[in-house]
């Protein structure tokens, strides 16, 4: 009889269930918040630089998961996730230095907008491969919000004129802002063009180094025109046809020594005229 009573009493006691994952995470967040608040209070009262830096490091390390979580919201937008985490972490450090513990205990309510602002500023200032003017960046940001609203209302993508009307700007400004988005991420020159072989670099013209000598060539052209015809012919065969002096002599009916003297005389005349022109300039 006693044994039954004991059994009944044991089975009738309410069971204490373990907290669920959500409750556990909530408890962890509260513990982090409480520890952060305590550290920031000590930081506000500390005057020793070394101890202050140690407290700052503790707060930053304690809240780094929040910085990473905020950074991951902006992943897959053309910027490496590691860079975004670093930017958010920098915002966290700024938030720690700028937080006033006497004005409130909710550090994350202050730090989260600071970190988000740093990430958005990073996208605005350094995320562009070809950075457009500030007005186009701001217009693109407004267009993204308006596009979402209009798409929900109409069930389709808004037209350029609809966007211009909603934003109260010209349609040309909307088009310019859309085109500026092409400068956010550029293709590699080593990448093959669409539907073609090779690379974009193959389609880029090489630098024409001969352009620098154009003035000299034009000046030389006029001087050559003033030479006797036979000397012009000898110069052309020697320097353009790459013939030897013997081959030139056989072609025009003179000896190799005569060709040598004619070449020397023509070149000396050209050199003297070039030096005279250079001195006059």
Image: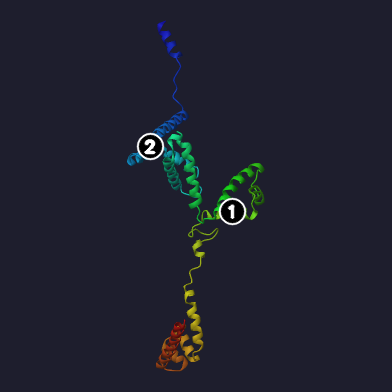
Q: CA distance from mark 1 to mark 2?
A: 46 Å
Measured as percent of width and height from the top left, residue 10 is found at 42, 13
Circles 1 and 2: CB distance less than 8 Å?
A: no
Left or right relative to 108: residue 195 = right
Measured as percent of width and height from the top left, residue 90 is found at 43, 45
Whether residue 224 is situated above or below residue 6 in the rendered picture: below
Q: Residue at x 50, y 49 (%)?
A: 123
Task: Single out the residue that lies furthest toward the top.
Answer: 1
Measured as percent of width and height from the top left, residue 182 is found at 55, 55
Check disc 2 and report its element: helix, strand or loop.
helix
Quadrant of res 243? bottom left
Whether residue 183 is situated above or below residue 46 in the rendered picture: below
| Protein image colouring | rainbow
Mark 2 neighbour class, 10 Å CA radius: few under 14, some 14 to 19, many 20 or more: many
Whether residue 149 is situated above or below residue 239 in the rendered picture: above
Check disc 1 and report its element: helix, strand or loop.
helix
Mark 1 neighbour class, 10 Å CA radius: few under 14, some 14 to 19, many 20 or more: many
Left or right relative to 73: residue 158 = right
The residue labelled by disc 1 is: 177
The residue labelled by disc 2 is: 43
- Which of the two residues, 147 or 167, is positioned nearer the viewer here? 167
Please state the total of marks drawn on the protein image: 2
Q: Which mark is residue 103?
A: none
Location of the N terminus by quadrant is top left
Quadrant of res 48? top left
Q: Residue at x 64, y 44 (%)?
A: 150
Measured as percent of width and height from the top left, residue 133 is found at 54, 55
- Which of the two residues, 3 or 17, is positioned nearer the viewer here? 17
Marks 1, 2: nearer the viewer: 2
Whether residue 175 is situated above or below residue 49 in the rendered picture: below
- Which of the two residues, 146 or 251, is positioned nearer the viewer here? 146
Please report whichever mark, 1 or 2, sits nearer to the chain's N-terminal start.
2
């Amino acid at each position: 009889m006693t044994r039954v009573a004991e059994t009944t009493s044991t089975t009738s006691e309410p069971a204490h269930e373990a907290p669920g994952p959500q409750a556990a995470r909530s408890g962890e967040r509260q513990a982090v918040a409480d520890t952060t608040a305590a550290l920031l209070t000590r930081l506000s009262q500390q005057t020793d630089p070394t101890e202050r830096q140690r407290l700052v490091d503790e707060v930053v390390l304690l809240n780094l998961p929040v910085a990473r979580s905020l950074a991951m919201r902006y992943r897959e937008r053309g910027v490496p996730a590691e860079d975004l985490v670093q930017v958010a972490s920098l915002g966290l450090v700024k938030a720690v230095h700028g937080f006033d513990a006497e004005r409130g205990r909710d550090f994350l309510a202050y730090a989260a907008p600071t970190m988000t602002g740093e990430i958005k500023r990073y996208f605005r200032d350094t995320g562009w491969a070809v950075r457009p003017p500030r007005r186009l960046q701001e217009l693109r940001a407004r267009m993204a919000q308006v596009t979402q609203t209009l798409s929900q209302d109409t069930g389709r993508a808004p037209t350029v004129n609809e966007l211009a009307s909603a934003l109260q700007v010209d349609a040309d400004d909307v088009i310019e802002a859309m085109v500026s988005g092409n400068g956010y991420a550029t293709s590699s020159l080593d990448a093959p063009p669409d539907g073609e072989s090779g690379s974009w670099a193959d389609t880029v013209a090489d630098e024409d180094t001969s352009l620098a000598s154009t003035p000299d060539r034009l000046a030389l052209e006029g001087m050559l025109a003033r030479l006797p015809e036979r000397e012009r012919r000898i110069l052309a065969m020697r320097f353009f046809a790459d013939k030897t002096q013997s081959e030139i002599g056989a072609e025009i009916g003179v000896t190799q020594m005569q060709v040598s003297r004619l070449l020397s005389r023509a070149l000396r005349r050209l050199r003297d005229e070039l030096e005279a022109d250079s001195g006059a300039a």
